[in-house]
Amino acid sequence: MVESFKIDSARARLVFDSRGDATIEVELKSGKTTARVAAPAGKSRGKREVEYYPDNNAAEAVSVFNSVVSKRLAGRDPADQRGIDELLTEIDGTGRFEKIGGNAAYATSVAASVLAARLMEKQPYEHIASLSGQKPQIPMPLGNVLGGGSHAGEGAPDIQEVLVFPAAVDEPLEAVKAVVAVHKALGSLLTKRVPGFTKGRGDEGAYSPNMTNEEALAAVKETIEHVSDELGIQLRMGIDMAASSLYSEADKQYNHKRSGKTLDRRGQIEYVGKLIEEYGLRYVEDPLQEDDMQGFAELRKSYGGTTLICGDDLLVTRAELVKEAGKIGAVNAMIIKPNQVGTLTATIEAAREATSYGIAKIVSHRSGETCDGVLAHIAVGLGANLIKAGIMGGERIAKANELLRIWESSRGSLGLSRLA
Ligand code: PEP
Ligand code: MG
């Protein structure tokens, strides 16, 4: 007989994220077992993401949860993930979590999976892998080391994130060490190179110097070459252009404010293509604005080669958009941010769709984060190729540290992702 569990009580509280913004934390209890998850928040958000909060107010979401949602969860089986997620969708009733808040749904949905895992005496990643049907594996860290755009102040590059990842390693510790080493070495290089640089960092802990895109890419390239030689690990470089943040719908142009460049659609495709070629970029996220899926396909055809062309705002973790992109070959990688879509079930559907089209899965943090390490379990349980969780700062390194704990607890039974 399959053992069944039940949620005895559910409550929400207001806590704060790494930007100091209010967010919701949900706590579920069953007997003496507790699971607690707090929601992150994005700044460069896709327009097809769910609503985070009713009336944009985290306190209102806490109040709705404690007065309406909590009693409906009591008595439910936390291992029935689909049932829990359907219940949240039904209570909300708007299709976009406008009433209960997508972040309340996210925190509840993920907390249910953690509670179920604890009650089954499993690791959360093992339970998530059995829900997803994906082969669990340890993803490589994709760390943000230098950034600008909407995550940093004036003078920083227009590119939102310059990222690095190891191609292949024998154990995750080497991978984390390598990405940390790049961040450290880059800090020293920027101190020497950029007049007045005070080691300032943006929202995700990446350095945010007064530099152009090209100067930033050259600095990171030089740093990874040096660190690769020193550690004997092949490191790759990539970017998140977060192009929707640069795009003006009114004049159909990409405005690169820092560099004073204004590009039309064709200009943007050629500009990103030139960066891929000149700097050997192996990863390019959101090179174009979120309504131009065809543009992603064109870019991939002309410049894709060995580069991962990745959709974030383009796909917002929605299975139907992944399918659309898969059919026209628009991307060969996708960002998976569970709070873009609100539930673990919908996240799993998007991940499965990605696998069916051979699209690489990149589980990602948000720019406003908490110290929860649960993202690492989601990444391993969905069989992600990369985990994009920054690298420096308590809320970022928390995910890398959890990955190391997962590896240790698996006693080598998990495979490690390898990227060419
Ligand atoms: C991103 O764009 O990939 C990102 C992590 O930013 P945000 O969380 O602000 O959407
Ligand atoms: Mg992005």
Image (spheres, grey):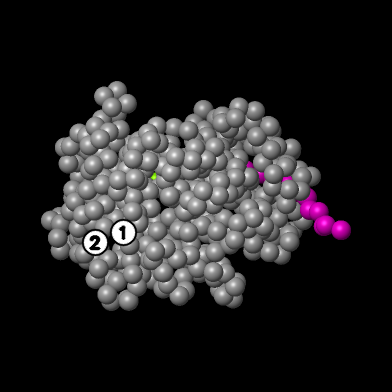
Regarding mark 1 in the picture, which secondary structure is present there?
A: strand
Q: Position of residue 34 (x, y in %)?
A: 68, 56
Residue 387 horizontal side relative to residue 284, left or right: right
Q: Is residue 25 visible?
A: no
Decide which of 391, 220 is in the foreground and name it: 220
Image point 16% across, 37% down: which residue? 260
Q: Position of residue 203 (x, y in %)?
A: 36, 49
Q: Which range is magenta?
A: 1-14
Q: Is residue 49 visible?
A: yes
Residue 418 horizontal side relative to residue 274, left or right: right
Q: Is residue 107 above or below residue 248?
A: below
Residue 264 horizontal side relative to residue 193, left or right: right
Amino acid marked by disc 1: Met
Regarding mark 2 in the picture, which secondary structure is present there?
A: helix
Tell me the quadrant of the picture where the N terminus can be found.
bottom right
Residue 12 part of the magenta-drawn span: yes
Residue tagged by mark 2? 221
Q: Residue 151's mark?
A: none
Q: Is residue 413 above or below residue 114?
A: below
Q: CA distance from mark 1 to mark 2?
A: 7 Å
Image point 18% across, 48% down: which residue? 212
Residue 85 horizontal side relative to residue 267, left or right: right
Q: Residue 237's mark?
A: 1
Q: Position of residue 242 (x, y in %)?
A: 34, 42
Q: Position of residue 217 (x, y in %)?
A: 23, 55
**Mark 2 C-beta to ligand 2 under 8 Å:** no
Image point 42% across, 63% down: which residue? 419
Tell me the quadrant of the picture where the C terminus can be found.
bottom left
Seen from this angle, which residue lies furthest top?
250
**Label 1 with label 2: CB-CB less than 8 Å:** yes
